[in-house]
Amino acid sequence: MTWVALGLGSNIEPGVNIRYCLDALLLKFNDLSLSSVFESEPIGFQGDNFLNMTVAFETEIPLDTLIKTVKKIEDDCGRDRTQPRFSGRTLDIDVLIYGNKSGAYSNIELPRPEIIENAFVLWPLSQLSEKRQHPALKKSYKQLWQEFDKTSQNLWPIDFEWHARLISEKIRQ
């Protein structure tokens, strides 16, 4: 079995689309580990805020099949692939980690460079993979999050329910 981490994001009907994605992933992969759900401001363009989270699971399916599966889920949510890279999304699913793969595979870089570039990827990933290490940096994702410049991007956990269960809570002061 291969441990996989996916990054999910949406800023067009994000609650609806994130829930749809979780349902679709649950049907395919059964036992999902879920991070908190975070709200973040868009990076690289003006638009509505995003909801982001990380989902992890173990699978026997090959990476190419996983990529096709997540692209189909994106398409089923109305993903418009003609839009610029930095634009609103009904649903974006990124394969962040696929086992111990490191390097270019199936037209993606693993682990994804966005992991160490964006708080909305690293913080939720660090919740699910505290002890796993980034293969090139030889640091745990938890340590990378601890070292991340948290003033560089605005990001906050939110209350989020899925199947009548609270899976994420905002930080209350």
Image (cartoon, rainbow, N blue to C red):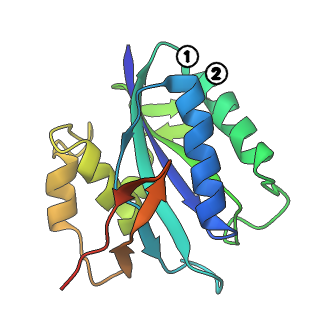
| 35 relative position to 41: left or right | left
User: SS class of the residue under badge 1?
Assistant: loop
Q: Say which of 75 and 136 sits in front.
A: 75
Say if residue 105 shows up in the picture.
Answer: no
Q: Are marks 1 and 2 in contact (CB under 8 Å)?
A: yes
Secondary structure beneath dot 2 equals: helix
Mark 1 crowdedness (10 Å alpha carbons): few <14, some 14-19, many ≥20: few
The quarter of the picture where residue 78 lies is: bottom right
- Disc 2 crowd rating (10 Å Cα; few below 14, some 14-19, many 20+) is few
165 vs 92, left or right, is left
The percent position of residue 85, horizontal first and vertical second, equals 69, 64
Q: Amino acid at mark 2?
A: Thr
Residue at screen point 55% across, 46% down: 94
Q: Which mark is residue 22?
A: none
Q: Residue at x 18, y 45 (%)?
A: 130
Separation of disc 1 and disc 2 at Cα?
5 Å
Where residue 125 appears, as percent x and y from the top left, is 33, 50
Towards the viewer: 112 or 60: 60
The amino acid pointed to by label 1 is: Pro
Q: In which quadrant will I find the N terminus?
A: top left
Q: Residue at x 58, y 55 (%)?
A: 18
Which quadrant is the C terminus positioned in? bottom left
User: Residue sitting at 61 percent across and 45 percent down?
Assistant: 21
For label 2, the residue is 65
- Asked if residue 104 lies left or right of residue 153, the reply is right
Task: Quickly name the residue at label 1.
Answer: 62
Judge left or right: residue 109 versus residue 157.
right
Q: Is residue 114 visible from the viewing direction of this image?
A: yes
Q: Position of residue 74 (x, y in %)?
A: 71, 46
Q: Is residue 84 above or below residue 33?
A: below
**x%, y% of residue 129?**
24, 42
In which quarter of the view is residue 105 placed? Answer: top right
